[in-house]
Amino acid sequence: MSLTVDEVRHIANLARLKLTPEEERRYAQQLSSILESAARLLEVDTAQIPPTATVLPLRAPLRPDIPRPCPPREKMLSNAPETEAGMFRVPPVLE
Amino acid sequence: MTALTDLSLLEAASALRKGEVSSLELTEACLERIDALEPQLHAFLAQTPDLAISQAKAADQRLQEWHKKTEEPLPLTLGIPVAIKDVLCLEGIPTTCGSRILEDFRPPYSATSVARLIDNGVVVLGKTNTDEFAMGSSTENSAYGTTHNPWDLDRVPGGSSGGSAAAVAARMCFAALGTDTGGSVRQPASFCGITGLKTSYGRVSRYGLIAYGSSLDTVGALTRSAADLLPLFTAMAGHDPLDSTCMPDPVPEINLDAGTLTGVRIGVPKEYLIEGIQDEVETAVRSAVKVFEELGAEIQEVSLPHTDLALPVYYLIAPAEASANLARYDAVRFGPRLKSEKLWNQYLNTRGELFGPEVKRRIMLGTYALSAGYYDAYYGQAQKVRTLIKDDFETVFKDVDLIACPVAPTTAFRIGEHGDDPLAMYLEDIFTLPANLAGVPGMAFPVGFDRNDLPIGMQLNAPHLGEKALFQAVHAYQTQTDWHLRKPDL
């Protein structure tokens, strides 16, 4: 399994990562060798094996729905790079 | 006279109760030691001396009141200086995960594990270095520089909880919190000659732990012995309504004096003592197994046949989960922003510029494994093979109580030794990944030294929620041996 630079560019775009051309080349090579090393995994017969998403026997436990105070708005906004009128400020999403 | 920082956590707790020392004196001794050694080790990303001194004074106040009427039980951690891995939130204190994308982030709340320790009176000295978002085995992936191993400054301390391990080994603190997603508590504990616990998945709340691989992440601790570790585990473990993956099961009371190993069955998996493992590591692990036998344990060879598949399974599942977890770094709610006219470009620029190379590599690997056309072949297949690995453990634990094996194939490697070769670095984790995939607990502890005087560690694994057996076995071993008492010359 080997990844082309075009495929790396596509994945980086899906993951919202801007890469330099040098990074694209390096990741194409490194990701290819990581996937090659995983090839033996693909050969295991798992037709009858269920997947494990979690090792816990718990299934979405619920806690009592009791109102409790939440942190003040200023505190939750205090790490934001830009705020306005008590909200997070972002560039326009729709033109 | 013993330096205060050379006391064990339990000796310090006892001295506090007898009034032989104050928490402020312990704290100042640790702060002085950090000042003296930090330039060589770089174990910390943030130091919190003001917080530490105020917590120490509060602990001393509580001790004074306790002396007037001693019937109220005091937590063993009261007044004990500790350090916290920088992936766990501590309200108001910079928490970076070793990443530039969280530079100057000050959490608005504390992790449950941290809050419970603080409720139990610990003194927080600071936040320790880590590979960026806990992705790595050496701390070389920290955006803020590598931590140096106290036993040999040219070598890595292991990772990702390398700052915590170095700080404990160097006697900068009595204990430290770490996290273990694929070996990140056990491997640095092994490289630094200390004791480290990876808790069972679901045993300790992860509320306030900045997520990496959510089906694998666990909170643990590093100390100089199993006995020192117990009060931290007791304080942290148990259900938390703020974490729906934290098990409601009661945490057993663990009494170390009563622990006997007579009749305890320990399995040694044949898949772990393989070619490529450093001779001295194998010899030390086999000698330690002999000690367990002399302590009354029954030793038998066991088989975990899917061990060699743990590496590819982990390096598909963990990156897949990471790619989803790290989607939240969007420069909207926290973190620096590389401004752009368009939101799309702002995402691309901020994330492309501020994530480090290993984090980007894993995000892309995970994105690929989850993408249309590859999901079943990679992520789906990895989840199925994970079932086989988990079943291996369940089968073996029908016959034995504990599994004994090495922590890492070698002792601490040199800084820069793996260069830009991600696969070579991933191989460091081959013996620690299976426990995370199976969700079982593990404890790493020192069992010898190699020819370069570098510590060798081994681990015991127990069934899910079986931490009690780990504490009892390692404590029994540490009453018979003194590897855990050795300290680096600094």
Image: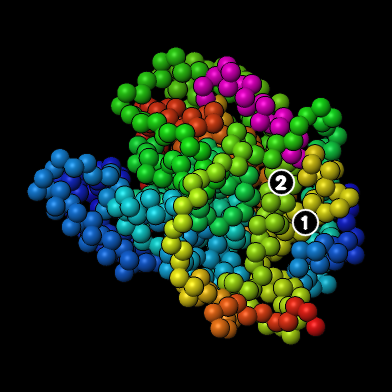
Q: Is residue B244 visible?
A: yes
Query: Residue B168 versus residue B55: which sits nearer the camera?
Result: B55
Give the label on residue B317, or none: 2
Query: Residue A63 versus residue B65: which sits nearer the camera?
Result: A63
Residue at x 14% of width, y 52% of height:
B65
Which residue reaches farthest left? B68
Percent across and percent down for residue B139 are: 56, 57
Q: Where is A73 relative to B123, above or below? A: below
Name the residue that disc number 1 marks.
B367
Q: Which residues are magenta?
A: B382-402
Discs 2 and 1 lie in a common subunit: yes
Position of residue B170 in the picture relative to residue B2 (left or right): right
Position of residue B13 in the picture relative to residue B18 (left or right): right
* Corner quadrant of residue B254: top left
Q: Where is A61 relative to B398, above or below? A: below
Residue at x 37% of width, y 20% of height:
B260
Give the label on residue B334, or none: none
Residue at x 40% of width, y 31% of height:
B252
Using the numbered discs, state the Cα–Cα distance from disc 2 to disc 1 in whole angstroms: 11 Å
Taking the magenta stretch, the answer to whether it contains residue B387 is: yes
As shown in the figure, which amino acid type bears the numbered disc 1? Thr
The colour scheme applied to this rendered structure is rainbow
Secondary structure state at the residue bearing disc 2: helix
As shown in the figure, which amino acid type bears the numbered disc 2? Ile
Q: Looking at the image, tell me whether mark 2 or mark 1 is earlier in sequence order.
A: 2
Position of residue B3 in the picture relative to residue B299 (left or right): left
